[in-house]
Image: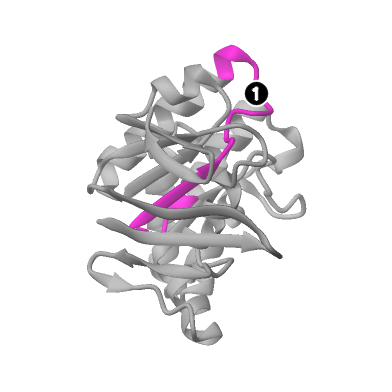
Amino acid sequence: MLEVRDLAKSFGAAPLFEAVAFGVAPGELVALVGESGSGKSTLLNILAGLERPDAGSVHLAGQALPFGNDEALALWRRAHVGFVFQAFHLLPYLTVSENVALPLVLNGVPSGERAGRVLAALQSVGMARHAGRKPGTLSGGEAQRVAIARSVVHGPRLLLADEPTGNLDEANAAQVLDTLRSEVKRSGAAGLLVTHSPVAAAAADRVLRLSGRHLAAA
């Protein structure tokens, strides 16, 4: 589903990483680990189309990311990428269901179809009964499960998670990791999880380590 070919990125004259190449199969969750400053989040942002590499290419379902075209890249990202953040990034003035519906609104899904898809996404993460609540009334684990529902509601081919358990206690982290893994399997998306946590990495099917400007199996 995801194929990364010889990616390189530098900041000024300092190389961050080079010759990064790997693939992720449909329904596979891969953990990306490494020391702070090794470039993990930058690599994730490149895969999401939020940053451009200096060299190399990224292919999703056989199609190359259009790094040279800002408008095409934004449309591609909106249609094909789901992103889960450490800080949830739920809009506090919207209800749970309204937050989850945002990707569908941005992708022009008709209102009559949105309600059913939002409900299905919330049911899949065990949050349907909280659809009318505001994010400020949720626990950290509940908020992150809502964020996962939002990230998958539009059927992305690529699901990216940047330290999704970083703000959670052990019990909530375990539940969120189980939910994330289940959603990757259910949807058939390619899943990539950036984490510092050995426990979170252990929940993945495979672990890759970014160190010394290069990527290798951990």
Foreground residue, 160 or 102? 160
Q: How many numbered circles does the render carry? A: 1
For the N terminus, give its image quadrant: bottom left
Q: Residue at x 36, y 37 (%)?
A: 30
Relative horizontal placement of residue 197, taking residue 29 as reference (left or right) = right
For the C terminus, give its image quadrant: top left
Residue at the extreme top: 171
Question: Vertical placement of 37 versus 204: above or below?
Answer: below
The span picked out in magenta is: 151-172
Q: Residue at x 46, y 84 (%)?
A: 72
Q: Is residue 44 covered in magenta?
A: no
The quarter of the picture where residue 162 lies is top right
Question: Vertical placement of 162 versus 42: above or below?
Answer: above
Q: Is residue 167 covered in magenta?
A: yes
Residue at the extreme front: 13
Percent position of residue 43, x then y: 52, 53
What colouring does the structure picture have? one colour
Foreground residue, 65 or 167? 65
Percent position of residue 137, x then y: 74, 33
Q: Residues within 10 Å of mark 1 (few under 14, many from 20)?
A: some
Give, as a three-letter code, the residue at label 1: Leu
Question: Vertical placement of 17 versus 212: above or below?
Answer: below
Percent position of residue 141, x then y: 60, 27
Find disc 1 in the rendering and name its residue.
Answer: 168
Percent position of residue 159, x then y: 42, 50
Foreground residue, 212 or 181? 212
The quarter of the picture where residue 146 lies is top right
SS class of the residue under badge 1? loop
